[in-house]
């Protein structure tokens, strides 16, 4: 098997900290990049990046973990990691972008609970992340103090879940729930577990990608006590699949937690077949199942990231038949009504009593369509 890159496992050459500090998640959080000077320790910032850090300071937080910054290419501003997290002036040029394209605020019965489906909710327990992705769907709230959840507000949301028996699946998201300390998360999971109608709890977290050292043995042992727990993480590019990230995912899966991945299709980052195939195949080497690939939303400041749906369909089509079936995510568009799968649909036509389907290599297959003649045995 191809080994994962050791990049980011230890401090970059010449960086002033010990290996123990580097792999300490609290050290990483305290020493995050917040200014152009901090950034200049890792890359040579371009004029556009320098101007954008200033121009966007009030609009959308700029924070990067040293770990993630060490994956960036120092000299190439088109580096896929760098483009995900370093501001660009293009963010100010997006007349069509919306603050809340999924109308999440309208779907909120209580603060930070988003209910689009009858049986499951996204519960934005935290407004903080380890770093801020420039295309974040929840830009309007992440890093904004008014969306923080005080313990009393978490209590109100928990009461709402307790009083709503249809809810069987609670997705803790944010922000990032793993930015919480273990004790607070343990308390929250215990509260959810005391609600009889909650079957599964999922964590949506980008920390395996942006701060893998946060996924400690102690965290995993705590999560394991609250099973069934599922985790969805968010890798977008194969260069993010480092040895440190693989070790974090391994700790989660060894604790019995199924780990899935949701990526966003981003222009110039992963919108080509070679990159997407390498991402998906690398994920399954880490025992992480590609779950969703999102069409980028009409979200403010992200015009430079959006890709036409046709390109997404082409990529998905090129993967089918050319890699393991479970390495292929479902390409979806998230809408205010929920997630909608975007083909490709193999069903070509109905022809009399037959259906005609198109295989991955373009060949057509004709299959008799079973007749629905009532319940079995009648
Ligand atoms: C994505 C999402 C879910 C979970 O959807 P699945 O398709 O079950 O993964 C639930 N609620 C909201 C609001 C979501 O956006
Ligand atoms: S980690 Fe997730 S929630 Fe946080 S900024 Fe990135 S996309 Fe948004």
Image (spheres, helix red, strand yellow):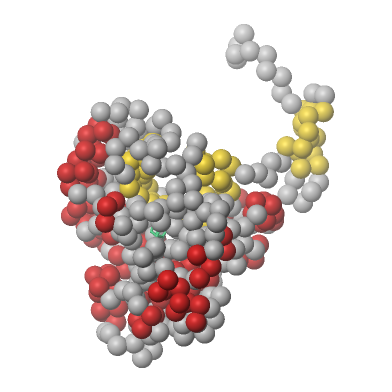
Q: Residue pushed farthest bottom?
A: 14
Q: Residue visible at 69% across and 52% down?
A: 310
Q: Residue visible at 30% across and 65% down?
A: 214
Q: Nearer the viewer, residue 177 or 145?
A: 145
User: Can you say which quadrant of the picture contains the C terminus?
Assistant: top right
Q: Nearer the viewer, residue 149 or 99?
A: 99
Position above or below: 246 against 102: below
| Position of residue 2 measured from the top left corner of the image (x, y, whole percent) | 54, 72
Q: Residue pushed farthest top?
A: 378
For residue 154, which quarter of the picture?
top left
Left or right of 44: which side holds 200? left
Q: Nearer the viewer, residue 108 or 42?
A: 108
Q: Residue visible at 56% across and 75% down?
A: 78
Position above or below: 41 against 359: below
Regarding residue 27, the answer to whether it shows in the image is: yes
Left or right of 34: which side holds 335? right
Q: How many marks?
A: 0
Left or right of 34: which side holds 72? right
Q: Residue visible at 17% across and 44% down?
A: 152
Regarding residue 283, the answer to whether it shows in the image is: no
| Position of residue 252 measured from the top left corner of the image (x, y, whole percent) | 35, 57
For residue 113, which quarter of the picture?
top left
| Position of residue 282 measured from the top left corner of the image (x, y, whole percent) | 53, 64
Position above or below: 319 against 194: below
| Position of residue 70 measured from the top left corner of the image (x, y, whole percent) | 41, 78
């Amino acid at each position: 098997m191809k080994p994962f890159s050791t990049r980011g496992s230890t401090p970059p050459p010449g960086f002033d900290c010990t290996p123990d500090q580097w792999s300490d998640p609290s050290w990483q959080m305290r020493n995050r990049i917040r200014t152009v000077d901090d950034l200049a320790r890792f890359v040579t910032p371009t004029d556009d990046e320098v101007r954008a850090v200033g121009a966007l300071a009030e609009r959308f937080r700029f924070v990067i973990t040293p770990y993630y910054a060490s994956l960036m290419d120092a000299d190439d501003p088109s580096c896929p990691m760098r483009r995900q997290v370093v501001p660009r002036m293009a963010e100010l040029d997006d007349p069509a972008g919306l603050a809340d394209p999924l109308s999440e605020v309208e779907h909120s019965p209580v603060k930070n609970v988003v209910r689009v489906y009858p049986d499951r909710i996204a519960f934005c327990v935290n407004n903080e992340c380890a770093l801020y992705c420039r295309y974040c769907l929840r830009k309007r709230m992440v890093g904004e103090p008014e969306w923080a959840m005080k313990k009393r507000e978490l209590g109100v949301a928990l009461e709402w879940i307790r009083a709503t028996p249809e809810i069987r699946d609670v997705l803790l998201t944010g922000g990032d729930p793993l930015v919480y300390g273990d004790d607070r998360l343990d308390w929250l999971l215990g509260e959810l577990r005391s609600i009889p109608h909650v079957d599964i709890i999922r964590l949506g977290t980008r920390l395996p990608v942006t701060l893998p050292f946060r996924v400690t043995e102690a965290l995993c042992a705590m999560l394991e006590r609250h099973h069934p727990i599922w985790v969805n993480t968010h890798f977008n590019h194969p260069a993010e699949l480092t040895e440190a990230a693989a070790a974090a995912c391994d700790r989660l899966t060894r604790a019995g937690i199924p780990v899935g991945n949701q990526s966003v299709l981003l222009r110039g980052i992963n919108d080509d077949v070679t990159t997407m195939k390498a991402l998906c195949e690398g994920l399954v080497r880490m025992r992480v199942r590609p779950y969703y690939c999102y069409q980028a939303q009409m979200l403010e400041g992200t015009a430079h990231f959006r890709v036409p749906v046709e390109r997404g369909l082409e990529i998905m089509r090129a993967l089918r038949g050319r890699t393991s079936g479970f390495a292929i995510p479902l390409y979806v568009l998230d809408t205010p009504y929920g997630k909608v799968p975007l083909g490709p649909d193999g069903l070509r036509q109905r022809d009399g009593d037959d259906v005609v389907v198109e295989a991955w290599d373009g060949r057509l297959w004709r299959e008799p369509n079973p007749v629905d003649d009532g319940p079995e045995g009648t």
